Amino acid sequence: MARALVTGNHVAGHALALAGEANRDARGCACGAYPITPQSEIIEYLRGFNFSKGYIVPVESEHSAMAVCIGASLGGARAFTASSANGLSYMTENIFAAGYYRLPIVLIAVNRTLGPPWNIWVDQGDSLALRDAAMLQFYTESHQELVDTILVAFRVAEDRRVLLPALVALDGFVVSHTQMIVDFPEQELVDRYLPHCNVPHRLRVDHPTTIGGLTWPRETEHHRREIQDGMEAVPEVLNEALDEFEQVFGRRPIGALSAEHTTDAEMVLVACNTIARTLRRVVEARRAKGQRIGMINHKLFRPYPRAELLEAIGSAKKIGVLDRNHSPGSGGIFWQEITSTLQARPDLIVQDYLVGLGGGDVTPQIINDIIDDLAKRERADEPIWKEVAA
């Protein structure tokens, strides 16, 4: 493997390029390309990559970028793109279409705050606004996890038991524009890991087909049920993909989530993306002082890993959820899913903390304050806003 000091955007672009090139002996690859801060460098990297059989297609909007991917995937190519914030919002119609067409397109979401008012810093509201799309969602903590997850996302999305698009999210600027040392796999290893993309319902000149025609209610009901079946197949397919990844690359990425120090924990905090890195430091420091605190790094959001979460929490009685997102009138989006999952555990206190919205710093002090608040709680309250001090 090649080791390099690179930005998160470089990592995403290179991983997509390796996956696309791995399909060169089949029907190639394609990317619909439109820039938006902070993901533009991903598209720039792909434009400069010398694909053996691939096309990077510049278009006039994010909506058209996903349309290119839909057309390419319907033609049997390995398809991918990237966007952020309002670009993802503009792409939404075709993201839903890609899922309903059962197309294994991989979308990189560099998380950025939706506007107006305009804000270019990290917030997960853009990708989580797509939570009801027929699409897998992965959230990544580091540069290395990003490259590994992109390859895993292709493997899972293209499996015939799944056949759904996949979104891989990373924190804007915190990961996209910072540098870390990454082990990049050689093309030969990626070729071994990723079978040729085979979209079984691709368009064929020898078998003309209409895609996306009018259906009756009963047909749509069956269609949605089949999508649910695909989602329910993800845990098994993901574990198989991780097993194969370990065999080919010699390391194993985390799956749906990782549980750290939860076996004996009295309280557990849940976070994802780069907030998990800061949380880990605080948890380690607290445990060094004898406090029984654990953490969960929440990676897979769709399909939601209910069984894994229940197992990971174990015997803890207090759960704190750190949400870098907000559903107006409700609260944090991860918190909503977690409370729904834990409704069979009335003995638990599950408290939501809204942190880092709009790119605010989530410092060790903020997390320490959250732990102190959770420790003294006898019941959960409405979501608590932890704003950065002026």
Image (spheres, grey):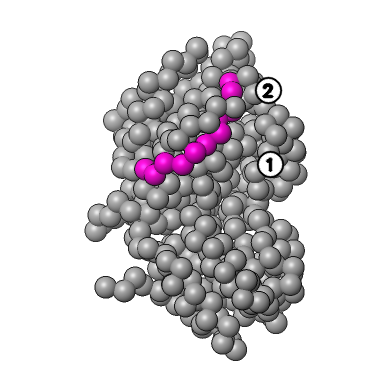
Residue 195 can be seen, yes or no: no
Instruction: Say above or below: 187 vs 335.
Output: above
Q: At label 1, which amino acid type do we have?
A: Arg
SS label for mark 1: loop
Q: Find out whether residue 178 is within the magenta segment.
A: yes
Q: At label 2, which amino acid type do we have?
A: Arg
Q: Residue at x 61, y 76 (%)?
A: 289
Quadrant housing the C terminus: bottom left
* Residue that carries the numbered disc 2 in the rendered image: 192
Query: How many residues crowd around disc 1 within 10 Å: few (fewer than 14), some, or many (20 or more)?
Result: some
Instruction: Say above or below: 154 vs 92.
Output: above
* Residue that carries the numbered disc 1 in the rendered image: 252
Magenta-highlighted residues = 177-187
Q: Quadrant of residue 242?
A: top right
Give 243 or 137, whichever is nearer the viewer: 243
Query: Residue 268, which numbered label?
Result: none
Give 154 or 200, whichever is nearer the viewer: 154
